[in-house]
Amino acid sequence: MADSREDFKAAAVHALADAALQKALLNVKRGFVVKREAAKAKLPEFDALREEARDVKDHTLAHLDLYLEAYERKVNESGGQVHYAPGAVDARAIVLRLCQQAGAKLVTKGKSMVSEEIGLNAELQASGIEVVETDLGEYIVQLRGERPSHIVAPVIHLNKESIERDFRRTHQRLPRQRRLDQAEHLVAEARQILREKFLAADVGITGANFLIAETGSSVIVTNEGNGDLTATLPRTHIVVASIEKVVPTLEDASTLLRLLARSATGQEITTYTTFTTGPRRNGDPDGPVAYHVVLLDNGRSEMLGNEFADMLRCIRCGACLNHCPVYGAIGGHAYGSVYPGPMGAVLTPQLQGIDRARDLPNASSFCGRCEAVCPMDIPLPDMMRAWRERDFARGNPAFNERLALRLWAFAARRPRLYHALSRAVARFLARRAGARGSLSRFPFLKAWTGTHDLPAPQGRTFHALYARARRGKSR
């Protein structure tokens, strides 16, 4: 997994100055936020489903060992095999071994954030196996040598012109005269390349949105159909998923599916929702001969017993990214992590350690929008605050940060001093702002005023108004 110490602050500054990225990020609001709100409004029982889904996941996590055992039994009964991977190294080794046993020279992959988490592609390629991402967005970022910038829309940071340049640079058989200036042209070009890969692949690897203990099925949701081709055309199908993806029943999966697409893309349901249960049976017209499921822990079991357990309810819809003002300003790559945005700010420190990812839980305004839109009711701000507390307890914050907190605490414990300072600072800022009402430059706040104006206080402080109101009542 990539190290998020790739100087988040410097990357954020660079992202804010990237005009093309800033233009592309406008699509987050147009393409996700507005559509989600419209889809939610059409489903009056959305909030009730949210509570039901939360309870389903909480129940499953409380009995995770039992449901994993039940899931494994059903997979075995269907002719498949389950492999447990304690960590990323183990998962990579298992998948590589299965590919080598299948004599794989070419592997096609459906969209899988877990495979990104464990660095699977590099492991297979280092062993001489060609790996091709078949989700269009993932295919494009693979051509560019990048990681996805969003867990649902991997190329939300790009525009058509940059993708055209990538295709002309990498597709050797692409005629110069072929038009690629529209989205449908780009899709047709990618489809032509990928069709050959689908037909030639020896192994197909997919992720899983859900694993169903009742039937031993894995579920993927896509809008392109590449997941189906990846799962059914090669002789071997490998599912790579983390242990918290298991749910008890088909009905539970249905409840979660009703929330997932609406929260992710504003659809009632995705174009393809595919349930895969074991290898090909006698009489089946297609499907793999061998079916394997690699279940990854990679720190999840530890989360079950700590204050971050609620994060395991996450269904990777991306709603918290779409509504986060920080993600909306800098995009996903600035986080230096497979998982960006609020969910990444909680999950990445657990996977990498707070020393390597301390900037991420600090990249939040605590506006609470992420928790408000989360279909699984995950208290993301509380968990980011918990990481900040752990970080502070380890002595990681810089001296100036610790000094500022100590000075604030000193004043906050002395109400008269605090109120006097508040009044003095408010008056000073108002005078500096003058008729304009805001400040474009201010000492110690260059990081803010470099890209924003600082609004000056207007009128009296809250404490002054409150004191005045109390005096009026006493009269």
Image (spheres, helix red, strand yellow):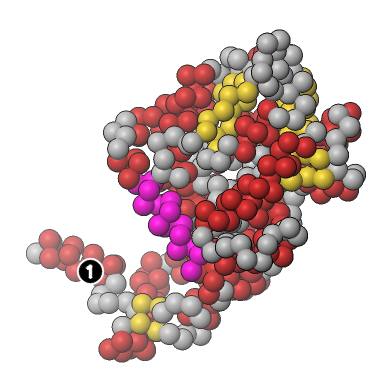
Describe residue 309's horizontal placement relative to residue 84 as left or right.
left
Residue ID at (77%, 27%):
236
Q: Residue 213: name its quadrant.
A: top right
* Vertical position of residue 25 compared to residue 298: above or below: below
* Residue 361 placement (x, y as % from top left): 58, 56
Q: Nearer the viewer, residue 466 or 388?
A: 388
| Residue drawn at x 90%, y 44% as measured from the top left | 127
Reading the image, the residue beneath label 1 is: 465
Start-end of magenta stretch: 23-37
Answer yes or no: is residue 440 visible: yes
Q: Secondary structure at mark 1?
A: helix
Magenta: main secondary structure equals: helix
Quarter of the rendering containing residue 350: top right
354 is within the stretch colored magenta: no
Name the residue: 77% across, 36% down. 201
Residue type pointed to by label 1: Leu
